Amino acid sequence: MPWDTTTVSKGTLVVGKDGVARVTGIIDIKREGSNLQPYLLSEDNCLFLSDQTGFWNLWSSKDSSGPIHKIDKDMGFPYGWIAGHQGFGVSDKGLVIAAKDSLLLLEDDGSVKCDLSALVRQAGFNFDVFADVMCFKDTVFVLGLGDATRIDTLLKLCLTTSTVRAFNESKASAELQPYISVPEVITIPTTNNMVCFGYYFPPTNPDCQGQVGEGEKPPLLVKMHGGPTGMITNNLNYSTQYFTSRGFGVLLLDYRGSNGLGRDFRRSLYGNWGVYDLDDAIAGAEYLVREGKVDRGRMAISGGSAGGYSTMAMMTFRDYFHAGVSYYGVCDLSALSSADIDHKFESRYCENLVGKYPEEEALYKERSPIFHADKLSGAIGFFQGSIDMICPPAFTTPLYKAAVDKGIPTFYVEYEGEGHGFKKSVNIQRCLSNEMFFYAKVFGFSLADEVANPPPIVNL
């Protein structure tokens, strides 16, 4: 995968007499590690990101001794998943780099000329991730993420006047601000003397203060991101706020294997998918229980894609959570390594995450929920898109049928015309209300909002 091993090469583009363009004279510039986002600064100098030091830092093809500016943070979000993103830019005033919560203008020698992230904060923005840098003369455009009160925002910085302007700023209205849950950043001790990270959003609703029973703690919803080498940001997300405004505490988890936290953390999931992600979800929930923030007796977990797999696996292999909801997940890991898989980009992905296939087919079966349906515990629901080419309905329906046969409370909803990640607002809204409806039935509480056409829950 691009975040494992990639090579930056240089060549000459030649258009032949036949009109076909070809690249000739290819020379490898950088082979070791994961090398991303090449940028031709001049005919003899290419800039690129490399994780050779353990973090994606900015390198130059003219100097192989080390990065231009060494920083123990990853640059270049979203880290190899999608082409066209840029974690740095070239301005009239110098190089500009975006590394997690740092936005820096560099001197020619790589030292910091100006901390632009401090300039952004002085302008009233509290982003903890900067990404997608583009420069023109003395102007910098950058995407700000990770402000709990705002959605992702395009910023324009003028390096001459030190001014900051937001282009598409959108934040919760003054009327909604009291209902917005602001997260706590937590570091979570987990198995093998390691740690994982998360954002805990406490329940927040001024209309319901004082209505909870004495000593009562809120239920917890742990949300597992996709990838599994994805990552979370704590920007304003109304799906999260939907649950916190209705009494849930929500934990967004960067389990081991997540991007943006360095190569060692990312690779710690290799060989351990279906183990460490589950360990970390339980560790996060236990941490919040010890802190007295949530109710151990009302635990839920949900996630989409790889997070959907983690949800299914959790409800199959670990008797800890009381309810789980999978969005377009997979219950048979071998299906992701099948020779006829349509999604070629990830066709060998699992060989690092699980093991060689078919040589280690037994390990795939050991970690695939569908082969252990007899171990299912707790209520589980499923949302699926009918035209999902990455995790098609056939990846989900077998476990649903197994849950029905075992007498476990369950539901299955398939949305016509939806793919991998729902796009239609009406379906997104239905998922939220239906997921909440499911938890209400399982945990035995009443909803303030009436849910129109809730999913039929079998065995409840």
Image: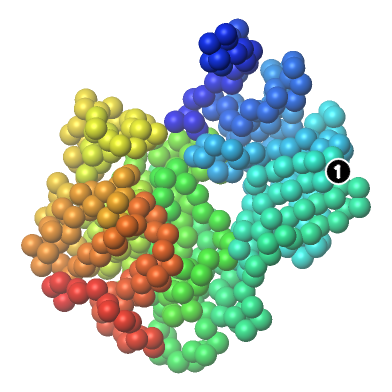
Residue under pointer 1 = 138
Q: Nearer the viewer, residue 20 or 55?
A: 20
- Give coordinates of residue 68: x percent, y percent: 74, 28
Tell whether 341 sits left or right of 213.
left
- Give coordinates of residue 107: x percent, y percent: 85, 34
Outermost front residue? 18
- Give coordinates of residue 200: x percent, y percent: 51, 65
**Where is residue 14, by image quadrant?**
top right
- Give coordinates of residue 146: x percent, y percent: 61, 58
Q: Quadrant of the N terminus?
A: top left
Is 261 drawn above or below residue 404 in the view shown? above
Tell whether 124 sits left or right of 168.
right
Tell whether 50 sits left or right of 61.
left
**Where is residue 23, by image quadrant?**
top right
Q: Nearer the viewer, residue 244 or 169?
A: 169
Disc 1 is placed on an element classified as loop
* Residue at left offset 60%, top offset 13%: 15
* Residue 283 showing in the rendered view: no
Q: Residues within 10 Å of mark 1 (few under 14, many from 20)?
A: some
* Residue at left offset 68%, top offset 62%: 168
Amino acid identity at mark 1: Asp
Outermost right residue? 161
Q: Quadrant of the C terminus?
A: bottom left
**Where is residue 174, by image quadrant?**
bottom right
Is 18 drawn above or below residue 131 in the view shown? above
Specify the color scheme.
Answer: rainbow
Is 449 drawn above or below residue 122 in the view shown? below
Q: Nearer the viewer, residue 256 or 445?
A: 445
Q: Nearer the viewer, residue 217 or 445?
A: 445
Is 92 drawn above or below residue 315 in the view shown? above
* Residue at left offset 55%, top offset 15%: 19
